[in-house]
Amino acid sequence: MPKNHEALGNEILDYLSKHPEAEDSLEGIVDWWLVERGITRPATEVRAALEQLVARKLISSRQGPDGRTHYRANPSNNVRGRKER
């Protein structure tokens, strides 16, 4: 994973470790989760980081009632204290 995607992935995992019930779309993650942390990145970079986290089964994705993909902590993996390596 490219370094910028790895750093974004770690920020997303850290957010989820502090908010384990959180779930949102790409837009919500870009506009709320990351902005709350003072991070602004293009949605394309955030999407790439999310796709890597899903591929590694660190987070899960599902189609929401609004038709958009929603992301959340993977219930079968404990994200608390877990960072990408």
Image (tube, helix red, strand yellow):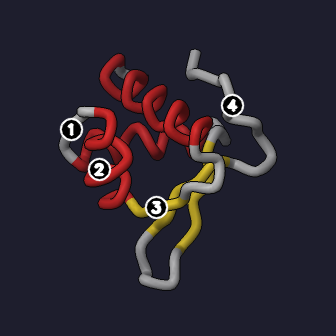
Which residue is under mark 1?
A: 41
Image point 46% across, 67% down: which residue? 69
Amino acid type of the residue tagged 4 in the rendering: Arg
What is the spatial separation of the Cα atoms under label 3 and label 2, in whole angstroms? Answer: 10 Å
Amino acid type of the residue tagged 2 in the rendering: Val
Could you tell me if the residues under marks 1 and 3 are in contact, i.e. CB atoms within 8 Å?
no
Q: Quadrant of the N terminus?
A: top left
Q: Residue 80, which numbered label? A: 4
Could you tell me if the residues under marks 2 and 1 are in contact, i.e. CB atoms within 8 Å?
yes
Image point 31% across, 42% down: which residue? 36
What is the spatial separation of the Cα atoms under label 1 and label 3, in whole angstroms? Answer: 16 Å
Spot occupied by residue 37 in the image (x, y as percentages of width and height): 32, 34
In this rendering, would 22 be left or right of 30? right
Spot occupied by residue 29 in the image (x, y as percentages of width and height): 37, 52
Which residue is under mark 3?
A: 24
Q: Quadrant of residue 72?
A: bottom right
Question: Callout 1: few (<14), some (14-19), or many (20+) C-alpha neighbours within 10 Å?
Answer: few
Q: Secondary structure at mark 4?
A: loop
Could you tell me if the residues under marks 4 and 2 are in contact, i.e. CB atoms within 8 Å?
no
Which residue is under mark 2?
A: 30
